[in-house]
Structure formats: C-alpha cells, structure tokens
Amino acid sequence: MPVITLTINDELVSARSGQSILEACRDHDIQLPTLCYLDGLSARGGCRLCLVDVAGSPRLLPACTTEALENMVVTTHNEKIDRYRRMILELTFAERNHTCAVCVSNENCELQSLAAELGMDHVRYDYLNPELNLDTSHERYGVDHNRCLLCLRCVRVCDEVEGAHTWDVMGRGVESRVITDLNRPWGDSESCTDCGKCVEVCPTGALFDKGSSVAEMKKEASFLRRILDGREKRQWQR
Amino acid sequence: MNPTSLAEQAAQELQRQEQLKLRLFLCYSTPCVAAGAEPVKTALEELLAKQDLAADLEIVATGCMGPCSRGPLLRIKNADGEEQTFEKVTPEQAKEILLHSIANQPVETTALPADLPFFVRQTRIVLSNSGEIDPEKIEHGIARGSYSALAHVLHEMSAEEVCAEIKQSGLRGRGGGGYPTGLKWNLVRKSPAERKYVVANGDEGDPGAYMDRTIMESDPHRVLEGMAIAGYAVGAEQGYIYVRGEYPLAAARLVKAIKAAERRGLLGSRVLGSNFNFRIDLRIGAGAFVCGEETALMTSIMGRRGQPVPRPPYPAQSGLWGYPTLINNVESYANIAPIMQQGADWFAGFGTEKSKGTKVFALCGEVVNSGLIEVPMGISLRDIVFEIGGGLPDGGKFKAAQTGGPSGGCIPAEHLDTPVDYESLKELGSIMGSGGLIVMNESSCMPDVAKFFMGFCMEESCGKCVPCRVGTVEMYELLTRITDGSAMLNDLETLEQLCRLVQETSLCGLGMTAPNPVLNTLHYYRDEYLAHIQENNCPAGVCQLDQIPLLKLPEHAAELAVFKEEH
C-alpha cells in the first residue's frame, strides 16, 4: 500500500494513501475533538470540531473528510482553532437542552467530556430551548430530542451497518429532527430491528436504554469496529 | 437536421418575417404578465381575427424586454424596420396602436423615447434575443442564429479548441463565484472517466434576483445550446438543467424547447449530423435555497436530501454519481454561443482587465426604472442607478446599493463610482453574486436590512453543520436585540465574533457568506448600530426599539407594571 509523508504540527509523519487527515492524526496519537465522526461510519463533516489548518488552503478544512496528501502541512491546534472549537461547542450547548445534572448520560457523555477537555466553561449565546418531546414508545429504548446534536450517527449506523434505515432526518436548519420511519413513533416502526446500535453510538443522552436513571446510561461504540473487521477483513476477535 | 438545413430554415423564417407589414412584440414574461399582458394579448388577437389581418401582421409573445416596472410593454415594428415601444399598455391602447399603425396613421398613445438611457446604455449579449423572439417558437430563435454556433463547433472545432476559446474569452462564472469558466471546462475535459455530466444551475434564490429566470424564459434555446457546446467540449453526453420549483414558466418553456430541439436533431442522438450525442433532462427543485450550492444541487439531482458535501473533491473530479461533472450557472451557458459565434477576442473587448463581457442585473428597489439590465463589466454603479435606473423616485436620497443577495453586502454612496466587476465589489466587502441589485434610500435601516438577510439564511440553512445551523439563529437573535432596543454594547462584540466563526467554519457557501451583510453594514454603517444600542435611536425610523436590556431592568423598575403593583 503506498505510503505518503506529511507534516502535522511541525512533525513529519507517515500515512497510508487514501487515509483522511483525521485517521492519520489518530494513528500518531494526535488528539482531535470530534462529535459526528465515528470510526466505522462514513465521514460527514458536520460538527466542524475537527477543523484543521492546511497550508495553502484559504479555509479551515474538516480533518475527517479531507484526504491526507503527500507533503501536506497540517496544524491541528492553534489559538484560533481552539477558540473556534469552543465557540462551536457553545453553539451546540445553546441549541437544545443539555442540562447534565438531570441527564441519563451524565459523566458518560461525549459532549460533556469535550466541553471539559476544550475548556468550554460558559455559553455566551441565548439558549434556544426549543419545545421538543420524548419518544419512549419503543419497548427497550427511548429518544430525547432535547439532547440530540444532529450528529446523525444513528442514521448512519442504522443505514450503513444494520441496513435497516429506520432513522432519517426531517425538516431543515435548526428545525431538523431525527425521525423513525417517516416520523412515526419508534415503537410502531416496522423497519426497526431492535438491535440497539443507534443507542450505543449516540454521543449524548439522546438515545438511551429505557429504565436508566441519571448518569446510568453507559455506552460502548467499539463493537462497531469488531463487526466491521469481521465483515470486511474476516478478522474475528473479542 | 444538418448545418445546411439549419441555415436554410433560418433564411426561410427571416423571409417570412420580412414579408409582414407589421410585427407586434408583446412582452410576455412573468412581470409583464403579472402587470396585465394577458388581456392585452387577447384583445389584440380578437381584433386580428375580426379584421382579418392575420396574413399581414404577427403578434409575438416575447421574453423580457427589460423595464419591468413599466409593463406591460408593447413594441411595434413596421416593414421599414421602424420601432416604437409603449409602456403600461392597456387593451384599449393596444387596439388603438394596432389600428392606427396598420392604417399608417400616427399613434395617439405616447411611445417611450427611443433614446431612453435605460435602452441605449445597455449592451445586450446574453439578452440579445430576449424580447425579440417568441421563446416557445424554435424557428424564431433559429432565424436569429440559435444553434449555428453549435453547428460550427461540432463540425469545425475540436474539444481542446473550444475550451481554449472559452479560456481566451476570459468568461468567468456568472453564478457569483467568478471562477474562470475555461479553466473549469479544461479540468472536466482532462478528468479521465467513462462518463461525464454537464449541469446548468438555474436554482436562483437570492431575494430580488431574476436574471436566470428571465434568460430561461426568454431564450431557452441559448441555454441549451451553451450546454450542448459544453458537453462537446468536456466529453459529456448527458446534461441536467436544474430549475427552482418557483419557476414553473421557465420549466415549461425549457421542456418545450428541449422537445423542439430534439425533434429537429439539434439535441439527442447525432446532433446536427455529427457523431456527438447529447441529451438534456430537466430537474425541478423543491424550494430549498441551499440547492443553489453546487454540491447540494448535485445531491438533489441524484434524488437525495439536498445538502452540501465538503469540497474537495470538487465536482470536476467527482460530481454526479461520482463522475466528473461540469456545473455552471445558466447565465454562463448563455454567454457561450455568442462567444463561439463572434470569437473570444470580440467578447474580451467588453468589460475590464479581469472581468470580461457583460453582466445581467436585476435592478430593483427604490429606483425609477426597475427591471432587467445587461451592462458591460466595469460600468460604474452611479451609471447603473442614475442613468439606466433613472435615479430614485420622489427625490429620494441614495443610501446604499445591495448586491449579491444574502451573501453580499451594501455599497454606500461614497463608493458609487466604483466599477462593477468581481474584484472591485469584493474589495468593498460585497460580491457580484448572481446579479441582484437593490437600491435603498434613506428610509432603510441597515441593522434591519442585515436582520432581514440573516432571517433568510436562518430559514434556508440546511442544518448539516453546526456553525450555520445554530450560528445563523444566534446572529438573528442578536440582531433582533439590536433592532428592538434590548442590546448592550458587548452584544455587538459577540455578534462580530460569531460572524467570523460562521464565515470561517461553515461547510458550504451559504454559511460562509451568511455573515457578509452583517459584517459589511457594520463596516460602513457602524454608527447606525451604535445609535440603536447607545442612544436607543433608529436614524431611519424603522425600528420600534420598545424593549430594554435585561441588565437595565432595575433602572426602569418604576415604569414596569409588575413592579408598580408591588410598591
């Protein structure tokens, strides 16, 4: 497999041809914050947290969707990028309702830990507090739209890995919502296989196991890699 | 049909037209129809049938003639080639004009002066057939040279030569970006692939802009011809023309035009007797502004949710279904045939050093002659507004000209002499955009204008990326506070920082340019913003300013009913 060399944060690193900048970074233990990206799912470039500076590009580029190229010079952290990442998190917090203290995913939430990691300690913008509901019609799982980031991991895992395509999006802009089966209650869904992959990949408490209380909802997305390695590479491991 | 029979048909049609005693051109594009062109047409036709004049004269329902605010427009042309144009024509006036003209008597209704600056200051290349032909009759177009450029290209030129010619002409993308068209064509031509596509972007969504609609409605064959030439130049056999759903007339005329051209062998298999095949299909948008962005437009053509995808890869490398795709604006395609007909050097003779040719603008707002104009690049804004536009009505004072719609900005009076081209407008913090030009007088409040455009972007954001989805809402909230009196000085700072964030981190052009109207008005009209915040005063008298900042509530406690009751 052809190998390329690029510079990330003033260090020469090697990467496989065709890898994204994000994959190259992760291979070399360079930490980049991400929310919509998940190893095993198609890259989307929506959360804008993995934006990096690529020399010669007039704009910041999302590391997850940009292919690493020979001789590329990438900067993953500087004052401006870090500030932008905090501001994007602020916007994410302001959009819906992310009150950690009453959330099932408290202490097990990717949004929460990113905010702590990036030092986002206050929100300057108006909380939009949209009136959103909870759908607990499914026998085992529930969806709380107030906690949803619209990362669409659920939509992608359901379509790309499970093959059910139960989840989709309706509306546009700030009115976007994830929906099941043409906006019918999840419990009435005929396409849902009850596999629970969407719940496990959800970064926040938007999708949860019914019956879990505050801070009880622990998730584990690494199963995805196991399934995909088995499917694609015939490598089975526990 | 081959090139010879095309020329024969053109000659035949011209001869027929010359034998007519009188030709009546009635503008039948959307603005004039809205102003009442339909009853005028009916009245004329009835009179024609009653007086048995059909052999001697012809009523042509044309595309746009330009001065839309003066519609319905009627132009008569007699056998000697003399022309007269009448504005705001009623059915009665139309009958009078017809009867007197046919009897060679002077017409009582006053015609528009022939030397009206609105007409004489324009250079019509793209719109040369607009207002001269019936867009639903392909013979009219052929008589004025439609498809002759395609015939020439297919039989006399190689694909490389076509791209070189376009490159030499200096034509740049008319959708707003201004990317050199020849370069783009070459990129697609050189991309190795078994299949390629050509796409025309007719999803024009800027408020107040209707250039593309008019081109598609008034001269659809010119767009189709440009696309076919592009298909030949880049090696594509399939074209798509994407028309926004709000343009049913344009879509209907394009469908008719495609059918007519296919029937005559001007599109389809073995075009004009050559080995080149080219089909064009129509795709209708479903009302999303973001689908004007090229990657979102392509996902929409493919039948998916109309959302943009990150670039690179650019459409020239990987577009529709992963194949190299050439995507240009409708107006860009409309420039192709004249360039191939008259040569790159002729075209490059118009315009400025870096911006060649002409640009179509939809001139509207506070201006005497609003309508559609085509001017050479580099003309000053003053000439557009005060010469062609005839200045502001009722002695209004010019305040700003808004260009580029929700992605653009306002150009203040002190920059009225700036030449209108891609670079100069960018320097002023606005953009050429697709060509909307809104003139504003002193009664426009700039923070309010910025709020209007931000509201538009907020509604139209697709919701894929966070900065645009939430950022536009938060910017709108801040602008609402400024215009309702509840803003503090630090809100202005927050707003500016947010603008920079959204500009630099959004996924597609919609988000990247959404803050432009705010940043641009903050640059030129900062005092207006400050007057709102610090003096609680709207200089233009538009904003209510009936709210107070939350932090100042205690100072106003005495005025508030809820506190009064407690005391």
Image (spheres, grey):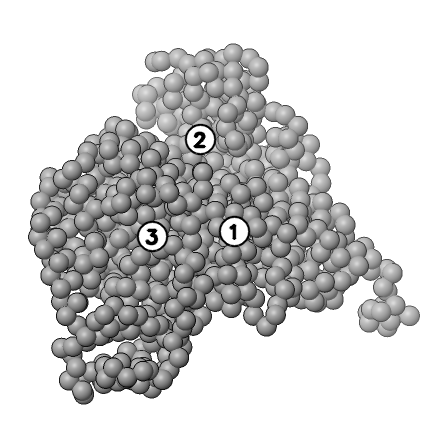
Q: What is the distance, in whole Å, between disc 3 and disc 2 at their CAs?
A: 42 Å
- How crowded pointer 2 is (Cα within 10 Å; few <14, some 14-19, many 20+) is rated as many
Left or right: residue A150 compared with residue B341? right
Which picture quadrant has residue A76? Answer: top right
- How crowded pointer 1 is (Cα within 10 Å; few <14, some 14-19, many 20+) is rated as some
The answer to whether dots 3 and 2 both sit on one chain is: no
Residue extending furthest toward the right: B567
In the image, A29 versus B115, the foreground residue is: B115
Could you say where residue A143 lies in the image, as x and y percent from the top left? 51, 48
* Label drawn at residue B125: 3
Q: Residue at x 51, y 68 (%)?
A: B368
Q: What is the distance, in whole Å, between disc 1 and disc 3 at their CAs?
A: 19 Å
| Residue bearing mark 2 | A65
The answer to whether dots 1 and 3 both sit on one chain is: yes
As helix, strand or loop, the secondary structure at mark 2 comes to: loop
For the residue marked with disc 3, what is the amino acid? Answer: Ile
Could you say where residue B403 lies in the image, as x and y percent from the top left? 52, 53
Contact between labelled residues 2 and 3, with CB atoms less than 8 Å apart:
no
For the residue marked with disc 1, what is the amino acid? Answer: Ser
Left or right: residue B170 compared with residue B470? left
| Residue bearing mark 1 | B380
Q: Could you tell me if residue B102 is visible in this image?
A: yes
In the image, A237 versus A205, the foreground residue is: A205
In the image, A136 versus B225, the foreground residue is: B225
For the residue marked with disc 2, what is the amino acid? Answer: Thr
In the image, B366 versus B10, the foreground residue is: B10
